[in-house]
Image (cartoon, grey):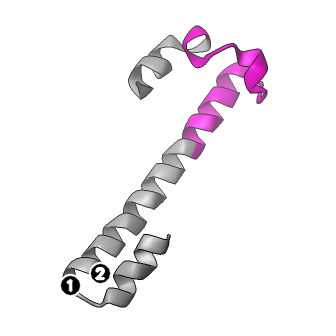
Amino acid sequence: MGYVLLGIFALTEISLVGAALQMFSHGIVTGLLFAMVGLVYEKTHDRNLNTLGGLARQMLLLWFVSV
């Protein structure tokens, strides 16, 4: 978020647009990452990464889309 503050305090049009786009993409990406974690937990009912043995073994299609 340091780049966002730097863009806001630069007070140029391009820096404000860049800061807004960065905030938007950050919100989208973090929301999708939480959705992915929720999907993995819903399918496997386990949060321990050591017992999953790799995402490709548990959910091949989800692994293929994320690569």
Q: Nearer the viewer, residue 66 or 3?
A: 3
Callout 1 amino acid: Glu
- Predominant SS along the magenta part: helix
The furthest residue to the left: 13
> Considering the image in quadrants, where does the C terminus appear?
top left
* Position above or below: 27 against 32: below
Q: Residues within 10 Å of mark 1 (few under 14, many from 20)?
A: few
Numbered circle sitting on residue 1: none
Q: Nearer the viewer, residue 67 or 7?
A: 7
Callout 2 amino acid: Leu
Boundaries of the magenta span: 34-57
Tell whether 54 sits left or right of 51. Answer: left
Name the residue beneath numbered marker 1.
13
The quarter of the picture where residue 35 lies is top right
Give the residue drawn at x 48%, y 21%: 62
The quarter of the picture where residue 3 lies is bottom left
Where is residue 44 shown, x and y percent of the image?
71, 20
Give the residue drawn at x 42%, y 68%: 23
Q: Is residue 35 magenta?
A: yes
Name the residue beneath numbered marker 2.
16
Q: Are marks 2 and 1 in contact (CB under 8 Å)?
A: yes
Tell whether 23 sits left or right of 50. Answer: left
How far is mark 2 from mark 1, CA to CA?
5 Å
Where is residue 9 shown, x and y percent of the image?
38, 89
Q: Is residue 53 magenta?
A: yes
The furthest residue to the top: 57
Q: Which SS class for mark 1? A: helix
Give the residue drawn at x 59%, y 8%: 57
Where is residue 7 shown, x and y percent of the image?
35, 79
* Position above or below: 12 against 29: below
Q: Which SS class for mark 2? A: helix
Tell whether 6 sits left or right of 45. Answer: left
